[in-house]
Amino acid sequence: MKIKSYLFILLLLPSLLAVAGKPVKKSTKVNKAPQSMEQFIDNLMNKMTIDEKIGQLNLPTSDGAVTGEIKSSGVAQMVCDGKVGAILNMKGTKDIRAMQKLAVEKSRLHIPLIFGLDVVHGYETTFPIPLGISCSWDIPAIQNSARVAAIEASADGICWTFSPMVDICHDARWGRIAEGSGEDPFLGSAIAQAMVKGYQQDFSSNTDIMACIKHFALYGAAEAGRDYNTVDMSKYRMYNEYLAPYQAAVNAGAGSVMTSFNTINGIPATANHWLLTDLLRNDWGFKGFVATDYTAITELINHGIGNEQEVAARSLKAGVDMDMVSSAFLNTLKKSLEEGKITIDDINTACRRVLEAKYKLGLFADPYKYLDDSRAKKDIFTPEHRTAARKLATESFVLLKNDNNLLPLQRKGTIAIIGPMGNTRNNLPGSWSVATRRNEYLSVYEGLKQMAGDKATILYAKGSNLVSDAKYEDRATIFGNKLGRDNRSDADLLKEALDVAAKSDVIVATLGEAEAMSGESSSRSQLEMLDSQHALLEALLKTGKPVVLVLFTGRPVVLTWEKANVPAILNVWFGGSETALALGDVLFGDVNPSGKLTTSFPQTVGQLPYSYNHLNTGRPMDKNGWFQKFRTGYLDVSNDMLYPFGYGLSYTTYKYSPVTLSSSTMNSDGSITASVTVQNTGAREGDEVVQMYIRDVVATSSRPVKELKGFQRIHLKAGESKTVDFTITTDLLKYYNENLQHVAEPGEFQVMIGTNSEDVQTQSFRLE
Ligand code: BGC
């Protein structure tokens, strides 16, 4: 083994030295692309051996893997041998150039590689987690966050991102709810489209990177919220509630799609021909390539649908073009071809799609297109990018409660920051912070201190560990980013906190999950505040001082007790690299909070799964009713959410006029306008997200009690009024019927407009 690797390094030495030395010229060996893409790829494929074609379908991780099992893949040698199409988990122009140079100069046909990474919510400038971003409902700002991410990642050599993640989720137990846009397909589609546009619009530029829609499909519907679990759902629900964001991202032109780990009605997504070919390509017209998720092909063996050779053949035939990390394509496709289990056309089709992506990215014209060393210094973590991240972070925060206008805080007196999230940098930015400079931004304590200046004294105490069970805390870790356990006893930690509290005028309790308690492989069965933190909060409240709960979380937390007992609650998710200053902006009232929940907060985990756009059932509960015998509900809790979809307070107040419709009837080819006037009735300017929901009252199939069909984020000065118009066309009224036809059926529709999904005013019209 040792001798082998020694020889290998010797073999590579000349090229590695060349790379380390002078700047690399654009390769002369690489074919320029004078002809049409098709001709170019035809010519190239005519020269390719079967092995080289299969090589293009292989996506290994660099040896420094950041997710999943680390494999020592000998990637560099495989690159030289033409056995790699793309690599994930590399960053930095120096390393990526070295690898690209091997592909371009050492492999027989000089085919460049694609370099992919999970640039999910920003890069070194890190934006809030996607669930947080979605709560801004600020589509241009969301698009810009993807643009910034693309600029920074491309400056570091990356040309492909595994984003956007557009999985709809109705179940807060699922840790990966943090990575998506919540429970609504309409908002989710708008965000999916914006993200794709932010990443990739014009590949003639070296700042645009290829998007990858994930996880296709329905990953967010994992049973019991347990990651990687089974999904089984009717086509009716699938088409009406889950598929739209994937399709929106396809329509926006995303270059690639990633399969999901789950089964769908018995067939794993990665081997699902209906999903990857009939739906994605034939119905939706997707033209890019499909990669699997990490080792998803060999996981099909565990799913029980065959051995390595069988599952690889089946995935290819289903429509997979690229195998992430499992090596099953590399290991078995040639044999399957020889045995007639797959055809050369199957291989050619997949290979062509991968080569097309490289062509579109401009890599054949210039394999070093994304390897401009001068860019990293000027394009990454710039003040402009950080300002954008800070602003979007302020918009992602959701003010859940604010009794007696406890917030905003004044910059005076003594403010105590107490809680395990209050002075950590390591655990602040969010679950996909793969490039965050964890030492270059501020902790909450540091940020508030800076923002208070000499006007207020800011004190800090940890108060408790994240959770009393140290083993639990260890499990809630990813990429080694531990919160850091304090070895003092609970009593000592609490005593220090109470001493600090005693010196203060107001307490900011910085509590919640650690960053890695949500995200991949981080499902939870209990969603209340963690034990030690709950005890701390109770003790802080007992001091009689005003307490503001600043909640860090990647998912809805059950806040029933907190809602009843804590005067002010600001939910801040994980806010990216600029969290601390953004939090200061909102806590001190320099920015008025405007975030609105995109995921319902339940009263108890027993209400899950839940989404506001549910069906009515034959025995609906009376509005505001709790228990009624023989009505759908629970003996021990009402059906209401603690905080409903669309909910979020402001430091000002808004008054909604009655809703008016331009007509009470609408033709199938016509449109009507629903209008509402919103007035800022408080003393501060602010942004309000005005939401429009529609209900199809009578249809062939049972339809949801309401569905989001429009929203506008408006800015209102104190006292100002604005009229908001929503145009309703037949398209907005369509749904997928039992035959999966997209239809708008004549009859009565209700239009509901308001400040959240519950607090609405209703009008009706008829579609003729
Ligand atoms: C995750 C994907 C991610 C991939 C590559 C997988 O474990 O499910 O979301 O893109 O790893 O890092």
Image (cartoon, grey):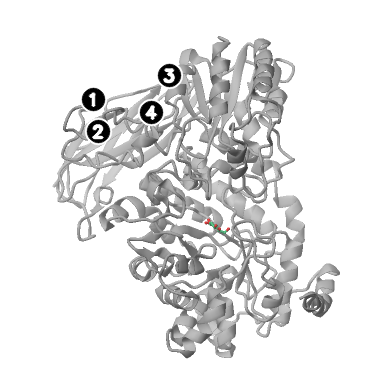
Q: Position of residue 538 (x, y in %)?
A: 53, 18
Residue position for label 1: 625
In the image shown, does 429 or 74 lie closer to the viewer?
74
CA gap, disc 4 and disc 1: 14 Å
> Which residue does the numbered mark 2 point to in the structure image?
633
- Front in this rendered view, residue 165 or 541: 541
Q: CA distance from mark 3 to mark 1?
A: 20 Å
The image shows residue 29, relative to residue 503, as above or below, that is below
Report if the CB atoms under discs 3 and 1 are less than 8 Å apart: no
Q: The residue under label 3 is which amino acid type?
A: Ala
Relative placement, left or right, of 26 versus 724 is right
Front position among marks 4 and 2? 2
Name the residue type under label 2.
Gly
Could you say where residue 630 lies in the image, as x and y percent from the top left?
Answer: 16, 33
Q: Secondary structure at mark 4?
A: loop
Residue drawn where x is 17% and y is 50% of the image = 701
- Which of pointers 4 and 1 lies earlier in the amino acid sequence? 1
Q: Viewer-nearest of labels 2 and 1?
A: 2
Task: State ligand 1's quadrant.
Answer: bottom right
Q: Identify residue type, mark 1.
A: Gly
Quadrant of the image occupied by residue 574: top right
744 on left or right of 161: left
